[in-house]
Amino acid sequence: MSVGRRAPRFLLSLAMLFLLAAVSGGCGGRRETKVLRFWAMGREGEVVQELARDFERENPGLRVEVQQIPWSAAHEKLLTAHVGRSTPDIAQIGNTWIAEFVALRALETLDGRVAAEGAVPPGAYFPGIWETNVIGDSLYGIPWYVDTRVLFYRKDILARTGRDVVPGTWEEWREAMKEIVADAGPDRFAVFLPTNEPTQAVIFGLQAGSPLLGENGTRGAFFDDDFRRAFHFYIDLFRDGLAPPVSNTEVSNLYREFARGYFAMYITGPWNLGEFRRRLPEELQDQWATAPLPGPGSAEAGVSLAGGSSLVLFKRSAMKEEAWRLVEFLSRPESQVRFYELTGDLPARVEAWDDPSLAGDPRAGAFREQLTRVVSTPKVPEWEQIATRVMFRAEEAIRGGTPPDSALAALDREVDQILEKRRWLLERDGGGGAGEDRP
């Protein structure tokens, strides 16, 4: 047979060989894509997808599936997922929720990974914030962003009292507030402390040294001397006309009221840095500032709440190694700075605060200083219920329906009832604290 007649058959065979090689090579070289499920809340769930794309580029074969969940539905959805055995691989949760999910035995401990990898060193975080993730002797979360409360105030109004900065102690702060009210005239107040929030009463109690709960977190300690002293200080701010006895819902627009001088100070969190810049009129942009909270001592500044969100891994995840790599990526200082630029959430890593976007902002600087003095609320699953009772009893006392000591006595009784199951668990376990990880 001539070469010419063999050519079509030869070319067909050659084409088949190329096709087989391509298929074989494609199969051998194909990297299976694994899907990492990440639940994130609110605005964070929206913007973290941008960071997730960067993570995917560094980790070929991994795809991050971000599910954005509204904060209002997040707690219930996480509980439902745990009961239904459908938890994600990694999630953002509020650090006050960690104790509850540890009690449900839903979360993976992280001590071994932190010690082995070295990419998430405990010393790189604010100690009080890191501590919120430790239950018993084990670490269950890595701080993602931080939250605390400081004092926002009108510099021009404070200056009328002859002061350039907010006083550092309760006594001096109270005197400054009295002078503000005397200068401002009727229907003006020194500080806005919304009556439908437990935050301020809890902060003052922590500043006074109260543990809030006693007997290994099984009973209320609100009638004890430390909290009583703080509670009377708090209630007297209303009774002496320094704070208006109103809730957030009774103030139609707090930014407008702050601008017109209805109140000169407000204890609030970092989200309001952006809101004050956006909502206050241009002529007031140089007339507001932030300061760490005053404290009860003769010369010491006060503590504030250790808040924020953490990243956790779930025990049922089959992709713990991959999920931990994502935690490490999101914990890098450069990722933390990028996340701050996208959301305004304050970084958990201390190194990130050296970035010019934060280091050059004195209003953010007050938060950095305050974050060195923060304390967590009691790490019990029932804390959210207890905080609601604190708010209710405090509002009763503020509005004059109940004497302060009677409100505290009632609060302790209610808290003791809420913690009845916790006492039973600890007694059954011999008081050793094993109730921390029981459902």
Image (tube, rainbow, N blue to C red):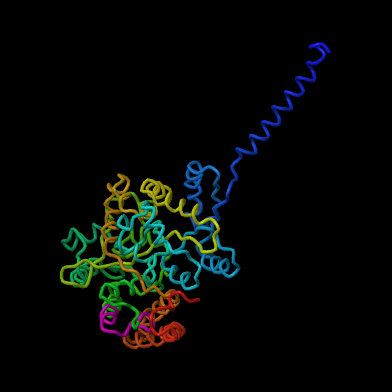
Question: Furthest residue to the front?
Answer: 1
Tell me where residue 242 sits by quadrant: bottom left
**Residue 168 showing in the rendered view:** yes
Left or right: where 96 falls relative to 229? right
As rendered, which of 401 and 4 lies closer to the eye? 4
Left or right: where 100 falls relative to 188? right
**Residue 283 showing in the rendered view:** no
As rendered, which of 124 and 221 lies closer to the eye? 124
Q: Residue at x 55, y 47 (%)?
A: 63
Q: Residue at x 28, y 70 (%)?
A: 186
Q: Would you place residue 81 above or below residue 280 in this image?
A: below
Percent x, y of residue 408: 34, 85
Q: Would you place residue 380 above or below residue 144 in this image?
A: below
Q: How many marks?
A: 0
Percent x, y of residue 392: 41, 79
Tell me where residue 423 sits by quadrant: bottom left
Give, as a single range, the part of the protein colored magenta: 216-231
Q: Residue at x 58, y 49 (%)?
A: 34
Percent x, y of residue 204: 29, 73
Q: Quadrant of the N terminus?
A: top right
Left or right: where 337 falls relative to 264? right
Residue 223 drawn in magenta: yes
Q: Would you place residue 239 above or below residue 333 in this image?
A: below
Residue 383 drawn in magenta: no
Percent x, y of residue 22: 67, 31
As rendered, which of 238 and 233 lies closer to the eye? 233
